[in-house]
Image: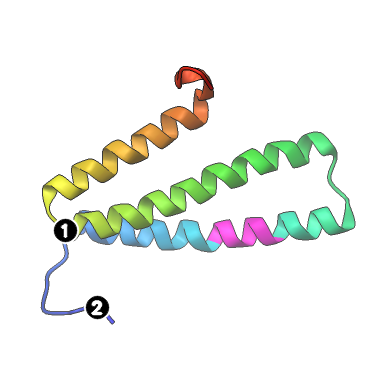
Amino acid sequence: MRDKTKKESGFTKAVDTAGGLLAFFTIIFILFMYIAGHFDFLPSDVSKVFSHIREIAIIAVVGLSGMEFALKRNKIFTIIWILMLAAVIVFMFFPNAIPGW
């Protein structure tokens, strides 16, 4: 249960709302993918694209959830979280950015 005595900023409320909505729709999307995989009614190309969308949606949900947590802590923790999230996003789209992989 949230402590109502502590006032949340508008940005924190927006991140909370966006994270909740994105989590809700991501679960619906994942459920659809499981059903589609079981009944095999999607072409393999579409299934591959949906797998990438699922990965991006999961990272977005975790990123927003972590951002909500970080915004309630000190500024240094928030900056560290943003840098780690940015690194994940960069490596997701540019996997060859890490030398030797």
Choose between 88 and 65: the one closer to the eye. 88
Q: Quadrant of residue 15?
A: bottom left
Please, what is the dominant secondary structure of the magenta stretch? helix
Q: Residue at x 16, y 65 (%)?
A: 8
The span picked out in magenta is 25-31
Q: Quadrant of the C terminus?
A: top right
Please name which of the two marks, 2 or 1, marks the residue nearer to the observer. 1
- Mark 1 Cα shell of 10 Å, populated few (<14), some (14-19), many (≥20): few
Residue 73 badge: 1
The magenta stretch spans residue 29: yes
Kindly report the distance in space between the C-alpha atoms of the residues bearing marks 2 and 1.
15 Å
Q: Tell me the kind of residue under disc 2.
A: Arg
User: Mark 2 vs mark 1: which is more N-terminal?
Assistant: 2
In this rendered view, identify the residue nearer to me: 27 or 97: 97
Q: Residue at x 53, y 42 (%)?
A: 56
User: In this rendering, is residue 6 above or below 47?
Assistant: below
**Secondary structure under badge 2?**
loop
Please identify the quarter of the rendering in which residue 5 is found: bottom left
Instruction: Tell me, for residue 89, which label it has, or none.
Output: none
Is residue 28 highlighted in magenta? yes
Q: Position of residue 3 (x, y in %)?
A: 18, 79
What's under tag 1, amino acid-wise?
Arg
Q: Nearer the viewer, residue 50 or 10?
A: 50
| Location of the N terminus (image quadrant) | bottom left
Q: Is residue 51 left or right of residue 66?
A: right
Residue 61 % position (x, y):
45, 53
Q: Which residue is mark 2?
A: 2
Residue for point 79% across, 60% down = 35
Label 1: state its secondary structure. loop
